[in-house]
Image (cartoon, rainbow, N blue to C red):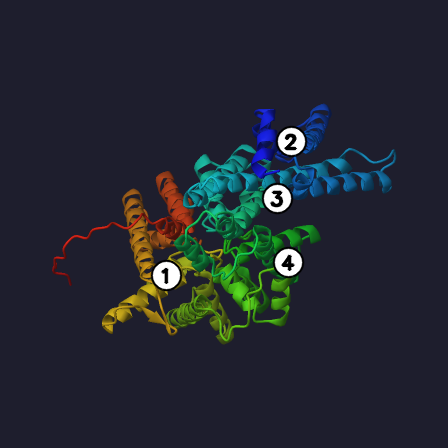
Amino acid sequence: MTLTRKRRALSELGPAPLLFGVAAVLAVIPALLEYGGFEHSAGSLLAVRLANFLFVGIFVLQHVIGLGLAPDRRRYLREEVADLLLLLLLGAVFVASLVVPSAKEGGPSLERFTVPAQIYLLVNLLLNLLRVFKAAASRRFHYARAFGISFLVIIAIGTLLLYLLPGALAPDRDLPFVDAVFTATSATCVTGLVTVETGREFSRFGQTIILILFQIGGIGLMTFAAFFAIALGKGMGFKDREVMRGVLNLEVLGTIVRVVVGILLVTVTIEAVATAVLYTRLGPDLAPGDRLFHSAFHAVSAFCNAGFSLYGRSLAGYVSDPVVNATVMLEIVIGGLGFGVVLDLLGRSFLGRGLLDLLGLARGGERRRLGLQTRIVLISSAVLILGGALLLYLIESDNPATLGGLRGPEKVEAALFQSVTARTAGFNTVPIGALRDASKFVLVVLMMIGASPGSTGGGIKTVTTVVLLLTVISLYRNRGRVEVGRRVLPEGTVNRAVVIVVSAIAVVVMATLVLTLVESGRHDFLSITFEVASAFGTVGLSTGITPSLAPLSKLTLCVVMLVGRIGPLSLVIALSQARPPRTYEYPEEQVMIG
């Protein structure tokens, strides 16, 4: 039985598949009503909790009907294995809740069953979203647009949650709609610019929403990229596959499950280790639960290059703590390298090769050296970080408001931290507004360049910058092709690098012009330029003017953050959809330049 016949059989249910998809979205509403800060009577709370089990029953019915109508039941079980295992796991939890004695008298209460049901419904929603993207891919949906649409959907959901749920805000706090949009955009685009203080204005529930947003925003783009590269593998042309392979630096893309598992495993491992380390340092006076949340929040924020902090002065209180500085900097660097580079580096270690073999992502044969993109990323990242740190140290070492009040080793550590965090992370250990103008300009350059392709960061990207510089050097040397590492770069790669840089400059210039007009007389030009560069690079560093910006300025920065997060990658993918070449050429004619 073919998949087409199976779909035809399932289509006999009419609008049932669409209804089940809508049900997956509606199924999370009871959890939002329960934890969103709404007031409930005993009866209404009971009704909300029972609604969870109603939706679980609906999805059980979905699979019963699907299995009954499937022409090939074995194939149906294979294709729906994730859903079915999830339901079996939920059933096992329910049975365990009945068997394990309850701390309360009178047997297990409804609360013991509600939370597992809510977790199942949330995971079920994520699986349904994955099906939507896969269905779009099978119909050759323009996947460059899918990146942008996915971020817009996440931002819209985050905005509604932060704005509509009273439980998302701290007591006696009010969040204007523009600030809700700005916060959701900044979190989803892993920027870190804030118009309201995260630790003071939002409740633990609201902070959790923000954490989820920048976790999805940080790894979501990489995951979507890997997904579309595989899901569209058969439907893409050779050039399209070459572009996606270059973006992700992957020689062979196995299956989507293995690639996604690889990304998630690396992410969870790094964030878990960082959480454990930060737990020993952050919030020593907090209760264990609060301390764990603070540690996890900052660990995830650092790896995703989000820059969100629960402290009003970011990490300025830990400027002299080498453990916090080293942990956060290491996370920022790894998160900014790109999944392909991390995969390449893992393949060089014994444990890494074992992991890649387990996931089915091991590269065939031994290679004598790292891949070209890995070498470019590592060298350019080292030059930018060390060069930026040196400049900041020389400029700020005698500034009493920044590095001047620190001891020798602490000055070096602080200068290095600000250089690393300018690579799209957004944390700071010294007040950015107190930096000298020359230092701010250095940070603007670092923020515009940003992280590396396929990473959790934004900006023009390191490889794009290097390709552009190599193009200029080749012209100086009167060479027709761009050469690097005994390799010649394709002409299409060079052209795309030029387009990305020019587009980035155009976006920053237009946004700076808008903010300069709107904020005329309120903020100086360098502070405005700094803010726009921070938004485009999805960095999050600010001289302190973000909360006082006019609504139009905030919305403009939202657009810049979105373009900075998805623009370069989406532009590369969109450009790969080349039209058939023309069969004719116009005659040449010289024009005067320079």
Q: Which one is nearer the viewer's eye here, 31 or 436?
A: 31
Asked whether disc 3 touches disc 2, contact meaning CB atoms under 8 Å apart, the reply is no
The residue identified by callout 4 is 272
Which mark is drawn over residue 30?
2
Q: Amino acid at mark 1?
A: Thr
For the residue labelled by badge 1, is the local secondary structure a helix, a strand or a loop?
helix
The residue identified by callout 3 is 204
Residue 417 location (% of width, % of height): 48, 66
What's the CA distance linking mark 3 and mark 2?
Answer: 19 Å
The residue identified by callout 1 is 464
For the residue labelled by badge 2, is the local secondary structure a helix, a strand or a loop?
helix
Residue 235 location (% of width, % of height): 46, 47
Residue 547 location (% of width, % of height): 42, 45
Q: Amino acid at mark 4?
A: Ala
Asked whether disc 2 touches disc 4, contact meaning CB atoms under 8 Å apart, the reply is no
Mark 3 vs mark 1: give the one in front.
Answer: 1
Q: Amino acid at mark 2?
A: Pro
What's the CA distance linking mark 1 and mark 4?
Answer: 32 Å
Q: Amino acid at mark 3?
A: Arg
N-term-proximal mark, 1 vs 4 = 4
